[in-house]
Amino acid sequence: MELIDSLKNQLKEVSQELAGLKTELHQARGYLQSILQKSNDMIFAADVDGILFSFSNGGEKVLGYSWEDVAGTLVKNLASNPLAFEKLIATTQEEGSSVRLDVPFRHKDGNTIHCDVSLIGLTNTKGQKVGTVGICRDITLSKKLQEDLIRVDRLAEIGRIASGIVHEINNPLAVINEIAGWAGTLVYDAGGLSGEDREELETAVRRIIEQTGRCSSITHQLLDFARDSAPAKRSLDIHQLLNETINFLKPDLRFKNTEIVPIFEESLFEIHSDPKFLEQVFVNLISNAIYATKQKGPGQGRIEIRTSKAGANVEIVISDNGTGIPDEDREKIFDMFYTTKPTGKGTGLGMPISQNIVNKLGGDISFESRLGVGTAFTVRIPVS
């Protein structure tokens, strides 16, 4: 009887212990489920063969894949370099854990997502290896910011060096300009020259003076940009400024089979703004339009520049019949250092600088584009 009572007590204790363990197991499972559902990190579990059997909701946030998309697939196929990721998992199973600070993964939309990855080897109660758990934190944005900071630092150094170069260039430009002026006086006073020869010499001297003046203006613009100077506003003829910009870019049109067509509103009057800043904006936009028409291939490229008055603003629309801007690039078009041009063809500074200038002048800039049809940028500048 005593034995039966003892067994009953032991059974009761075991039952209570099992109930407690069951409660703890249930809580642990709930905690784990909560982590998998609410974590912004991608957390996965794969068996010894690398086949996924668990994938957190954060995985969908990071890579765009749902559990249904990846269930039963090889985890290595999520990485941009499956072979390297497979080796990393093998190292984890041998050493018990591993950390890699930057592993590129493929997003569902095809983009590359960079993650800090921590891998932990799973073992059962017998010490046998049964799989791998990975915790992957998206560092794409911070990686981009680091790269941008490096570029900004490099740009600042370029600006410092350029400032010194500009001063060195300005000195010989001043000498050339002075000599050209002296040569113009000699031509004017020289005897024995035919009317045609005198006119040709005077034209040549005048062009030298104009071009040295343009070079000097460009160097001063570079200095102003490096110093981030405030706009120097004055009255200007917007049509004259646009025509000067077109003439400045004519060498780019020589072999590109592209025409620029000004369509100016005749009644448009002078505005009060910064001509140097506006010229920089127009050079960037028209240069991009020239490039877009060239990239479209053989055929007559056409760039229209329209002006009109809209309330208290002047609108300048620069449109082209070029390649257009792909949908995935439109939200990034004003991002610093972002460019759709190949390496060596663009810095990714033209559009953000143009936007910054227009905002400084109290205006705004927008665009519309259709892939394969063309792009139109609209710049709105206050009249005063």
Image (tube, rainbow, N blue to C red):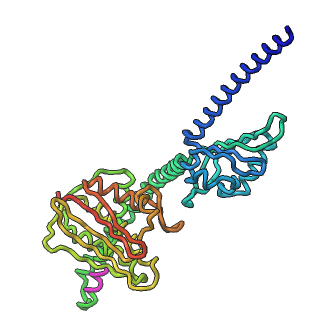
What's the residue at 69%, 27% (across, down)? Answer: 22
In the image, residue 319 sits, relative to residue 354, either above or below, namely below
Q: Position of residue 106 (x, y in %)?
A: 60, 57
Residue at the limit of the structure toward the top, as seen here: 2
Q: Position of residue 284 (x, y in %)?
A: 37, 66
Residue 45's place in the image compared with 231, above or below, is: above
Q: Magenta stretch: residue 45 in it?
A: no
Residue 253's place in the image compared with 88, above or below, is below
- Judging depth in this view, the residue of 169 and 100 nearest the camera is 100
The quadrant of the rendering that contains the N terminus is top right
* Residue 203 is a magenta residue: yes
The answer to whether residue 124 is above or below residue 197 is: above
Residue 24, percent from left and from top: 67, 26
- The image quarter containing residue 110 is bottom right
68 vs 133, nearest the viewer = 68
Dominant secondary structure of the residues highlighted in magenta in the image: helix
Q: What is the quadrant of the C terminus in the image?
A: bottom left
The residue under the point 25% across, 83% down is: 190
Horizontal side of residue 355 vs 70, given as left or right? left
User: Does the image show residue 342?
Assistant: yes
Give percent across and percent down for residue 198.
26, 86
Q: Which segment is the magenta one?
A: 198-204
Query: Which quarter of the figure has residue 2?
Result: top right
Give the total of numbered labels: 0
Identified at 39% across, 79% down, the residue is: 253
Please identify the residue farthest to the front as the structure is shown. 1
